[in-house]
Image: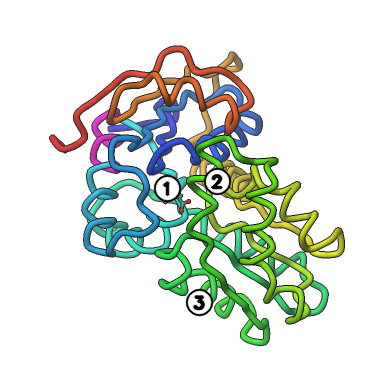
Amino acid sequence: MPDRNSPIGIFDSGLGGLTVAREVFQLLPSEDVVYFGDVGRTPYGGRSKEIITQFTRQDISFLVEQGVKVVVAACNTASALALDTLTSEFMIETIGVIEPGAISAAGATKNGNIGVIGTAGTIHSNAYARALERIDAKLRVFSMACPLFVPLVEEGYVDKRATYLIAEEYLAPFKNNGIDTLILGCTHYPLLKPIIRQVLGETVQLIDSARETARVVAQRLAASSQLNPKGTDGERKFYVSDVPDQFAQTARHFLGDTVRNAMRIDITKY
Ligand code: DGL
């Protein structure tokens, strides 16, 4: 049975969840962490609910087998489409990124108009809109799928003119609906903050669920007396479902640090 000395498990469809891992490392430096990136099957964003649920089930099973004490679904698409179904299948606590992002946005908005951007899967699931409605039914939510953002970030196009033009196109409706807060509802989008700010201006607050998710993880572990008591630096292990080279090279854009020890596993066995 996992106990407070056990690691925290974090998974994503690939690299993007490292933005959440980064916040967890900062907030909970003495926790051991096992990260799984499903790079062999990424992206999840345009896939069906059935496939995403099947992949997510395997991602969680792998982490459970590593003996983790909690699982963080650091992927908006998996959190939006699969987590409700899967939470009851596993004995372990699972934390997604939707609720934390919605709580942050609801706390940040002054005029009640909130924009949400994400993958097609996340936006069509309406998971953010439902989470925001549960918090405050008076909030007005405007959503937009931005499917080209993920490949652009993966290619390192975070400050290119082409990305700016695509962002202008996607975000144009938000210039007219009076939003004062925008949820970056995809793990990759925090890397596009400068371009999104250029397009929407400084008055729109950008909400990145990574930090809030890490806070929720810390709160839940504290509430159940599961925080690791050792005062030393936590151990970090990275697993991927394809050759780790590309993951290791690109990881620093998301993590702000290099990953040296990523190991390949066969996720289809789980
Ligand atoms: N991690 C995914 C998300 O946050 C983005 C990448 C993908 O489509 O798999 O929605």
Mark 2, ligand 1, within 8 Å: the answer is: yes
Q: Nearer the viewer, mark 2 or mark 3?
A: 2
Q: CA distance from mark 2 to mark 1?
A: 14 Å
Of all residues, the one furthest to the bottom in this rendering is: 138
Give above or below for 224 relative to 255: below
**x, y (%) of residue 242?**
28, 28
Q: CA distance from mark 1 to mark 3?
A: 18 Å
**x, y (%) of residue 87?**
31, 57
Name the residue: 40% across, 35% down.
9
Camera-nearest residue between 144 and 50: 144
Q: Amino acid at mark 1?
A: Ala
Q: CA distance from mark 2 to mark 3?
A: 22 Å
Which type of secondary structure does the marked residue at label 2 adopt? loop
Q: Quadrant of the N terminus?
A: top left
Find out whether the residues at labels 2 and 1 contact each other: C-beta distance under 8 Å: no
Find out whether the residues at labels 1 and 3 contact each other: C-beta distance under 8 Å: no
Disc 3 residue crowd, few under 14, some 14–19, many 20+, Cα 10 Å: some
Name the residue: 22% across, 62% down.
50
**x, y (%) of residue 62?**
25, 35
The disc at residue 140 is none
* Residue position for label 1: 73
Q: Quadrant of residue 152?
A: top right
Prevailing secondary structure class for the magenta stretch in the rendered image? helix
* Residue position for label 3: 130
In terms of sequence position, does the residue under pointer 1 or pointer 3 come before the other? Answer: 1
Q: Which residues are magenta?
A: 60-66
Camera-nearest residue between 262 and 39: 39
Left or right position of 245 against 218? left
Give above or below for 228 relative to 183: above
* Residue position for label 2: 188
Disc 2 residue crowd, few under 14, some 14–19, many 20+, Cα 10 Å: many
